[in-house]
Image (cartoon, helix red, strand yellow):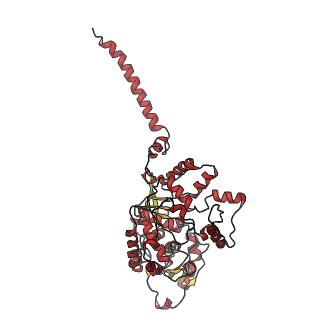
Amino acid sequence: MIQIPAVSVSVKPLFGVLVVSLSVLLAISVLAPRSIFSQTSFSSLSREGFDIWSVRRMVEWRPCKWWLQGHLTALPEKSNGYIRIDCYGGLNQMRRDLCDGVGIARLLNATLVMPKFEVAAYWNESSGFADVFDVDYFIQQMTGFVRVAKELPPEFASKEPFPVDCSKRKGQFDYLESVLPFLLKHHYISITPAMSQRRDRYPEYAKAALCQGCYSALRLTKSLEKKAAELLLAIPKPFLALHLRFEPDMVAYSQCEYTGLSPSSMEAIEAARGDKKPWTGDLAKIWRRRGKCPLTPRETAFILKALRIPTDTHIYLAAGDGIMEIEGLTSVYTNVVTKSVLLSGEDFKSMHGNTKAALDYYVSINSDAYMATYFGNMDKMVAAMRAFNGLYKTLFLSRRAFSELMYKGLRGKRLMRALWEAHRDDFVMGIGSALPDCFCEFKL
């Protein structure tokens, strides 16, 4: 005879224990603190062919709603005068100056006139704003954000603006207290914005003007954009745009010492040093560990391999002439192309330095992926524009991580694994993908 009650008594406690046990395990798995980079997830990433771009991001930077969708503060009925932004350096440094200048013009309720590009000292040429950017498009896009004049009124047309030193002006009240009085007195002034502006202290209407001028209003001239589109079309797809900096002046400026370079590279560096002598002893070690030393092409190739970028990847080298030791990269990654190879000789020679830089910029913001060995003006601008366009395969190779890991004695596979982990963390959290002035953090 089957004793159902006896069976019932033995099963229920067992079932209850099982339910309680499963509940406890589930609670532990949910509530226990876990790193987003758990061992399990890393093991899944270690599969062959799983490159850095396959890692799931946790954070993205997107254009802030207060800029794109906000209600603009109406411009005052009367302008306080005219302001010209004098921009110096390479194309992207001048672009940074212009972005800041737009915000300052709105802050001072000034009418912005066409900026002056001071390129002679940098490129040994005379190309101006209108040679690179579409003036009419810029004026149209800035409507409602800041007044822009294509030409000065007759009373100022033949005069040079009154120059105002802004080398120490960085915040809203600096400009209102120290620069505005000159604008009200002379009605036409010129400024060059200081580096490291405190844009976070600007009122929202001035920040909105800066963001609009920097990311929406600057478009290449039609002829230059056509040339850039042709260059983009000629690059095999998909491709990685790599901004590699290892020119003699760059290395000399860093004040870093290198071993194992060719005699010709060492001579070029010494010729470019001038009075910037390299650090030595403990200071040299500290300097390098802080990530101040440019990555060599060979080191760059090593990091790319650590990030599991296939060696047959098509790479567009977004760089100027004079990169040293390039064989350290091309001996590992053999599908590397440059604009000088893809463009016809005469066509390329006739272009100015700024227009060549504009081609690299255009290709970089439209590439399938972008990496840089430096976090300079071009890299910041490219990363922000890629974020603006919804392209997030952007990563800056960490000189600091490479130096720190080398200092700890890591080599070979151990170094590769550590480099993967360092860059994976940066990529997942969107570090460096856009500056916070115009972009807001968006958690996925």
| Residue furthest to the top | 1
Q: Where does the image place residue 202, in percent across and percent down from the top left?
A: 52, 68
Instruction: Report the quarter where the N terminus lies.
Output: top left
Q: Is residue 125 above or below residue 234?
A: below
Instruction: Using the image as rendered, state which of residue 229 and residue 432 is in the foreground.
Output: 229
**225 left or right, relative to 435:** left
Q: Is residue 36 above or below residue 325?
A: above
Please name the residue shown 62% across and 72% down the image: 168
Q: Where does the image place residue 425, in percent across and percent down from the top left?
A: 51, 51
Q: Quadrant of the rendered structure where residue 266 is?
A: bottom right
Instruction: Using the image as rendered, state which of residue 208 and residue 369 is in the foreground.
Output: 369
Q: Is residue 319 above or below residue 396?
A: below
Query: Count of labels shown?
Result: 0
**43 left or right, relative to 261:** left
Q: Where does the image place residue 16, in percent across and percent down from the top left?
A: 38, 23
Q: Quadrant of the rendered structure where residue 191 is?
A: bottom right
**324 left or right, relative to 25:** right
Q: Where does the image place residue 395, in percent across and percent down from the top left?
A: 49, 58
Instruction: Using the image as rendered, state which of residue 171 and residue 434 is in the foreground.
Output: 434
| Residue furthest to the left | 1
Q: Does residue 312 show up?
A: yes
Q: Is residue 263 above or below residue 192?
A: above
Q: Does residue 112 show up?
A: no
